[in-house]
Image (spheres, grey):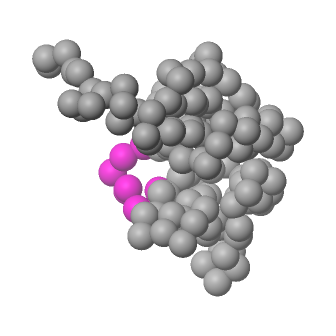
Amino acid sequence: MIFVNLPVADVARSTAFYEAIGFTKDPRFSNEMASAMQWSETIVLMILRHDFYKTFIPDKSIADARATNEVLIALSFESRDAVDAIVDKAVAAGGTGDIRAPQDLGFMYGRTFQDPDGHVFEPHHMDLEAAMAAFPDGPAHEPA
């Protein structure tokens, strides 16, 4: 399983945001300091109030996700319409949509949104067969 821990200013507000875009709150692991937000059987987003999050990193400060980026969270979807739908839901729930231009490579389509705390999500859809046809030898990379 993958647990992504995100610091948030307001657990109740963030819980409502994530429920509005399709996550399910697991009450067994949720309280006023944290909410376990289930995305799938294997992926859980743990939203943690700043003071609680700080107990995990006592010697580091919490990044202000509105001013700096700490992570990009990419979520895969079954279709382009599903990508568009979650971005629309995120905006309706108080997030910010399309912080950069949508990406359409033919075989892959992606957009972005930020949650109310500024954490960046990249919902995307990839047609794997088309991607394999476009890159039969794997994607070309520039040398580092």
Image quadrant where residue 109 sits: top right
Which residue is located at x 19 percent, y 16 percent? 142
Query: Would residue 116 appear left or right of 77 to someone viewing this image?
Result: right
Residue 59 on the magenta span = yes
Image quadrant where residue 67 sits: top right
Which residue is located at x 69 percent, y 61 percent? 23
**Number of numbered discs visible in the structure rendering:** 0
What's the magenta region?
A: 54-61
Which residue is located at x 61 percent, y 62 percent? 39
* Placement of the C terminus among the 4 image quadrants: top left
From this viewpoint, is residue 76 visible? yes
> Quick check: 87 above or below 4?
above
Mainly helix, strand or loop, the magenta region? Answer: loop
From this viewpoint, is residue 53 visible? no
Which residue is located at x 67 percent, y 76 percent? 26
* Placement of the N terminus among the 4 image quadrants: bottom left
In front here: 128 or 65? Answer: 128
Q: Position of residue 6 (x, y in %)?
A: 53, 52
Q: Position of residue 136 (x, y in %)?
A: 27, 31
Query: Would residue 78 appear left or right of 133 to someone viewing this image?
Result: right
Q: Position of residue 112 (x, y in %)?
A: 61, 31
Q: Position of residue 36 (x, y in %)?
A: 61, 69
> Quick check: 120 above or below 52?
above
Query: Would residue 32 appear left or right of 38 to someone viewing this image?
Result: right
> Quick check: 72 above or below 5?
above
